[in-house]
Image: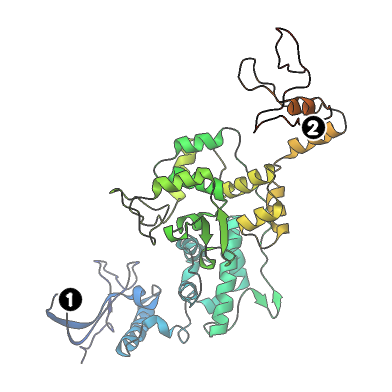
Amino acid sequence: MARPSKTDHVKKICGCAKWKDCAHPWYIRYYEGKELGPNGKVRKRGLRCKLAQLVGREPKDFADAKAEARRAIIAWQDGRDARELLPVDAPTLASVLDAYGQRPHGSPIDRYQRGPIVTTKVNGRPFGEWRAAEITREMVESFQCQRPTVAGNRDLAVLRAAFNWAVLKGLVPSTPFKVGTVSAVKLQREESRTRRLQPGEDERLLLAARGGMRDLIIAALETGCRRGELLSLQWDQVRADLFLPAGKTKAKKPRRIPISTVLRRVLDARRNDPAGEPLEPDTYVFGDEVGRRRRSLRTAWKLTCERAAIKGLHFHDLRREAGSRWMDAGVPLHMIQKWLGHANISQTSTYLAASGGGDADAMKAFEQAAGRLPAAVPPVPDAGSGDPLTDAQVRAANGLPQIAPSTGSVGSEPIQSSIEMTGNTQSNVTVH
């Protein structure tokens, strides 16, 4: 039997004279019976923690704290988590987001995205503390105005999905994103990024990178992978190519990316642990020295760009740079679409169109075809280099017809020029 409490088992651990009205957090103290503790000693059985940890939010006042404490105690007595009673007790937005991120077969919400959503103040209170059922379209738009364009659109996409899920689960009666069947909140227009690496920036980035950041930059430029795809890459995904399962890609579809020679050298250098033993298959390729996962690149990337004196470059821009380099080198667009994991080829075309890669080369080829510029001529090696041009190369460079190879040629030796000098003159003549 629990002891009676004048404060309904809630209190604050502070020395404030008016503790019921101060800003310190609420705690719950409720004991009922005894149990065996982890150290083998008998202890009181009950609840002793911050109230917000049980109910998913900080109570607004003393009355709210007592009501939430009663809810938590009932749930504990029934052997349940207090947050399981959210459908009855009008959950907060923070609680809805947490429940949405923990849904079966669903992707969790990134903590770096959840943080700004629940802490941004809307109408004088953190957005996450508002009851989800009380949130209106005007409050969502107020939140949107306080966020950057791109980040705000991503946040609204998460909020819209979370509210739709909450409506289906009965957590809230309706969503603020719709009035009837009409969408009530519109995303802001985004300007497509066109940032590519300028000449010399890739070398400066690699010189400024510390630790594993250098290998991550190389991997991003060689594979076009997203940040999360690289950080979640494990050794059992490294085969003749890189295999990205559906659960680790944005499109939720599996993807394979060929491994270049440059990337292969990076992977070989990272394959073993400090003791020289190969890392386990479930360890992370771009983790620490023993294969533990790296959680974030934000600080490391910021410091790398500062040391390299590079401004306005996002890590995701390396993905566009990789795709643009492939396109400039003549890789077919459908193959680039496959490597980048885009849903359709038009998305790839739009994604790379803004980069402007290859424009100068395309114009040069047009002017050569139109006769405005001379046709490209292969470079002539220096005299005495030991690598003279073959007759076929000479004729191709000067627009002359080719001569069929003689039957007396052996192996892979170059065909001797049909222009020969007699006497003591040089036998191989370079035609200009």
Q: Is residue 96 left or right of residue 424?
A: left
Q: Quadrant of the C terminus?
A: top right
The amino acid at mark 1 is Pro
Given the current orientation, which residue lies at the most extreme top position?
424
Q: The N terminus appears in which quarter of the rendering?
A: bottom left
Q: Measuring 66% from the left and 31% from the top, which residue is drawn there?
A: 410
Q: What is the x, y in percent for residue 274? A: 30, 48
Between 402 and 405, the residue placed more toward the observer is 405
Position of residue 129 in the picture relative to residue 373 (left or right): left
Position in image of residue 125 (x %, y %): 48, 67
Mark 1–mark 2 distance (CA, rounded to whole Å) = 90 Å
Q: Residues within 10 Å of mark 2 (few under 14, many from 20)?
A: few
Three-letter amino acid code of the residue under disc 2: Ala
Q: Looking at this rendering, what residue extends furthest in the bottom direction? A: 1
Residue 377 visible, this angle: no
Q: Residue furthest right?
A: 370
Give 407 or 336, whichever is nearer the viewer: 407
**Is 41 left, or right, of 188 in this rendering?**
left
